[in-house]
Amino acid sequence: MPENTKFPIVYVRGFAGDTEGIDKTVKDPFYGFNEGSTHVRVGAGNVPSFHQFESPLLRLILDEDYKILVEGGQEAYLDAHESVPSNSIWILRFYDVSATTWGAEPKKFRIEDAAADLLTLIDKLREKSGASHVHLVAHSMGGLICRCLLQKVLPDAGRDPADCVAKVFTYGSPHGGITFDAGFGVFEKVRDATGLNGAEVFGPERMYEYLTPTSDHDPQGRPPDWRARDMPERDSAHPKAFPRSRIFCLIGTNPKDYDVAFGLSAAVVGAHSDGLVQIENAYVPGAHRAFVHRSHSGRYGLVNSEEGYQNLRRFLFGDRKVEATLADCRLPSIEGTTWQAEVRLSVRGLPIVMHEQTAEHWCPVQLPSSGASADVPLTTAFLCSGLRPHGSDTTMRYALQLRILSLREQLGFLSFGDHLEQTADFDDTLVVDIGEGTWAAWNSLIPGTISHYEPSGTSLQDEDERAGTWVANIPLPGSAQPILGEQARIRLTVTRWT
């Protein structure tokens, strides 16, 4: 793909439910992606302070010079003009044919039909904009429509999805379907058997139908080892599989705000969810992902969040990818003890945490406790060097907080005999500055406040001879060595991202 090209962006919304929900959805010209949010933060002096988020659609117009083109409708505009700019945003209005508000006989909604409509729109946009690819941005079920396009519709047409789709970003998509902690599987069986409001699209049988190419369908039905959230890797066995490295899954970890907005109980779906989609079902293994403490939808949901937008912007338009790995860690092998890591990633100048995996939010990083040396991926971040003010000598600054916790069990139950609640065995923050060089320092070794800290000394050196890849290893503070081993370190790997 060409570098630094603004591709058309297509938004694909989520599940509308029954006919009433569909009719309500089609009344919105932008299917809800134009909605923002307001809330109150605690400011200086413990005084509440107003905070506003202007919606991802408007933010891309303001920040990235995108255009929204409407002339009696986006489809009408596209049909009436021979050319459109590539830096444009489009809404896939796939629900229109299933609404009763137009007076015509409504058509039953099907994922495959929506994916076919998406392909028609993509082909029109590529033809009229001259762009080689488009970006797809989807919320909830919209991510499954995108995957149906990539895994079924395009392969059935003999086409390579990577030839027309650049990147895919999903907000809270149920890649592994929707399951419930309560009901012992009864709720899922009733849903899939009755097709209540079309919700069977989130069950395994129906997902197998629209996520499997026709040529690969098993005549005996869904194989027992088939998992909805798995996508084949692009290799010699699957030369036309869409690269998972071009997918980013934003995962919500706050079920409570969804309860408030929609009256659904987290006790049904489970606390380890965004209120509707369980955490382990919200991503494709092998794809990039970030965890943020937001609910599935609503005013305080993933789409209407600064966390979501900043991850989206950097994934689509960033120029560097940085992977942080806890390398060569060797945790003590103690009977009845398991180890977890908590990770938070912050970016200077942003009022939010970009990525947050914690035990409190049901998503800590599970660490090996076998006593053997291991590498544990912590997070992947995308950098936009162009976001730094022109002429500024300020470095891009990132903070990676790492906490190591031990849990002890006796007879299958947590043991609290010598336990200190929410107290980590190791807790420190790695501060990384990127400018003309790259510097890294642990917060425990920085005198004074981080905001006044200025990096000095020799910058980190590239330890990888391969062109296009930069690697540096940062030793852990001495306090971590008895826990993680003397060889443990944070490895940063930087590669170009286009």
Image (cartoon, rainbow, N blue to C red):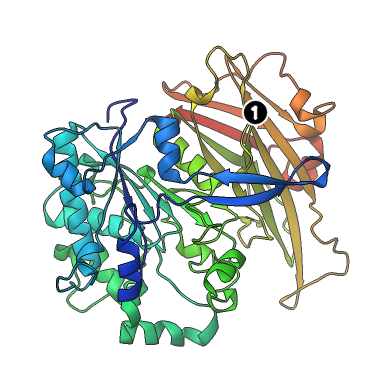
Residue 140 percent across, percent down from the top left: 40, 61
Q: Viewer-proximal residue, 425 or 390?
A: 390
Residue at the image point whose x is 72% and y is 38% from the top? 429
Determine whether, in the image, residue 178 is placed left or right of residue 66. Answer: right
Rendered position, 470 above or below 182: above
Residue 114: which quarter of the image?
bottom left
What is the tally of numbered marks visible in this picture?
1
**SS at badge 1:** strand
Is residue 312 visible from the viewing direction of this image?
A: yes
Q: What type is the residue that disc 1 sits on?
A: Val
The C terminus - image quarter: top left
Q: Quadrant of residue 152?
A: bottom left
User: Which residue corresponds to mark 1?
Assistant: 432
Between 425 and 443, the residue placed more toward the observer is: 443
Mark 1 residue crowding within 10 angstroms, few (<14) / some (14–19) / many (20+) = some
| Quadrant of the frame with the N terminus | top left
Q: Nearer the viewer, residue 169 or 66?
A: 66
The answer to which image quadrant residue 486 occupies is: top right
Q: Residue at x 15, y 35 (%)?
A: 128
> Residue 409, percent across and down?
75, 71
Measured as percent of width and height from the top left, residue 265 is found at 57, 76
Which residue is located at x 50 percent, y 51 percent? 304
Q: Position of residue 310 (x, y in %)?
A: 51, 40
